[in-house]
Amino acid sequence: MQAAAAVHRPHLLAPSPLRGRTRRPSTVRMALREDGPSVAIVGATGAVGQEFLRVIAARDFPYRSLRLLASERSAGKRIAFEDREYTVEDLAAPGVFEGIDIALFSAGGGVSRTHARTAVASGAVVVDNSSAFRMDPEVPLVIPEVNPEAMANVRLGKGAIVANPNCSTIICLMAVTPLHRQAKVLRMVVSTYQAASGAGAAAMEELKLQTQEVLAGKAPTCNIFSQQYAFNIFSHNAPILENGYNEEEMKLVKETRKIWNDKDVRVTATCIRVPTMRAHGESVNLQFEKPLDEDTAREILRAAPGLTISDDRASNRFPTPLEVSDKDEVSVGRIRQDLSQEDNRGLDIFVCGDQIRKGAALNAVQIAEMLLK
Ligand code: NAP
């Protein structure tokens, strides 16, 4: 199993005129199929782009052809994937979306705003990881386990945009939606503990570098974040809005309402960066319309797709970012009645999820899989 995983791992290679000329595919992948869609990955060199490739390989997502796109900085780089080598192409080059059925975008909101409509005009379905279209009423905002019905009108071959929610929203709603369906959430208070990966590959590198620097007694390099990240926590680096919330917090508020199609649900959030690498933690306090006791809640969560329960009070073991890293499932624990609320109308839970995996790449590939059904 380990050897197979190593074969599927995408590797960025330095540009070399010799690479790729002599290599031949040594095995034929089931995923490379004539009847599969032709796929483009926009932002293929980034943290999420590289994760797209891992998820495509892990799930045997079928594709007829694969096109890897990034900025002109990375154009010409080679990426080895599933026994082939691909050359990264410049997104700005003309005609890059011709013949593309599905375009997985993860290169930031500005890039999506500039290029997603071009892909749609070529007939592609764009699954967009940025916030550019999430609140557009014409664009479905989808977590496949939560609101697959939102994609009812999206068809392969008919250009469209589908938005991937923010990573914190996906991880939170994976756990809370099954409880919401049972008892209806009236109010939700979310406090996040967010990993470096949410700010991209360069932020992960900066956290590693800072950790080494601080341990060596040096001043930490602060290029991505404006303050020391290693051995520290700080309010999420998203811009602060006029209402005092930051953009990350307001995404949890607005996206929850759209995904649940419930404009009245009350949501408040405080988003914090912690020096973990790739998985977020979220403490969630819930107030329900109907009573829901913790044992029933635990059973509901145990039966829900995409979740694991880690709730061992005897040994004080609950979800951790490390345990969910590189995993598809979101982990839920600390499931307990909120004693401040009457008649079992409140619960507290703690949730951890790999935000590059389920919080970004996996969710997008699941959306793409829905298009093939
Ligand atoms: P990243 O590691 O910094 O990677 C950014 C990617 O975008 C790189 O492939 C980069 O290509 C490409 N890119 C940047 N500017 C471009 C341009 N003008 N034209 C074409 N390609 C361009 O960031 P990331 O973590 O993968 O996140 C990328 C985006 O995904 C974020 O901005 C956000 O909108 C969204 N997102 C991220 C996460 C997450 O977990 N990190 C979660 C949800 C959504 P070069 O190699 O050429 O620079």
Image (cartoon, rainbow, N blue to C red):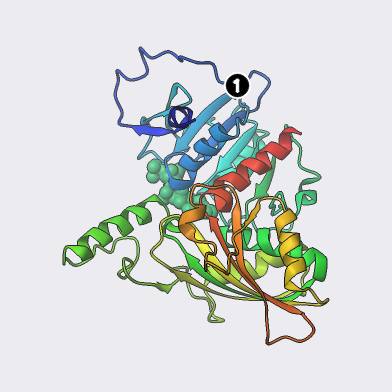
Q: Is residue 57 above or below residue 234?
A: above
Per the image, the residue denoted by label 1 is 30
- The foreground one among 266 and 191 is 191
Judge from the rendering whether residue 216 lies leftward or rightward of residue 295; answer left or right: left
Please determine whether, in this image, residue 245 is positioned above or below residue 330: below
Location of residue 105 by image quarter: top right
Q: Is residue 302 above or below residue 214?
A: above
For the residue pair 9 and 265, the one nearer the viewer reads as 9
Residue in the picture at 31% in, 70% down: 227
Residue 154 vs residue 58: left or right?
Answer: right
The answer to which of 373 and 60 lies nearer the viewer is 60
The residue positioned 49% from the left and 61% from the top of the image is 320
Element under disc 1: loop
x, y (%) of residue 251? 60, 66
Residue 62, percent from left and from top: 63, 27
From the image, which quarter does the C terminus lie in?
top right
Disc 1 within 8 angstroms of ligand 1 (CB)? no
Does residue 128 appear left or right of residue 72 in this picture?
Answer: right
Residue 329, compared with residue 338, is above or below; it is above
Q: Could you tell me residue 338's position as x and y percent?
A: 68, 81
- Which of the pair 90/360 is nearer the observer? 360
**Residue type beneath disc 1:** Met
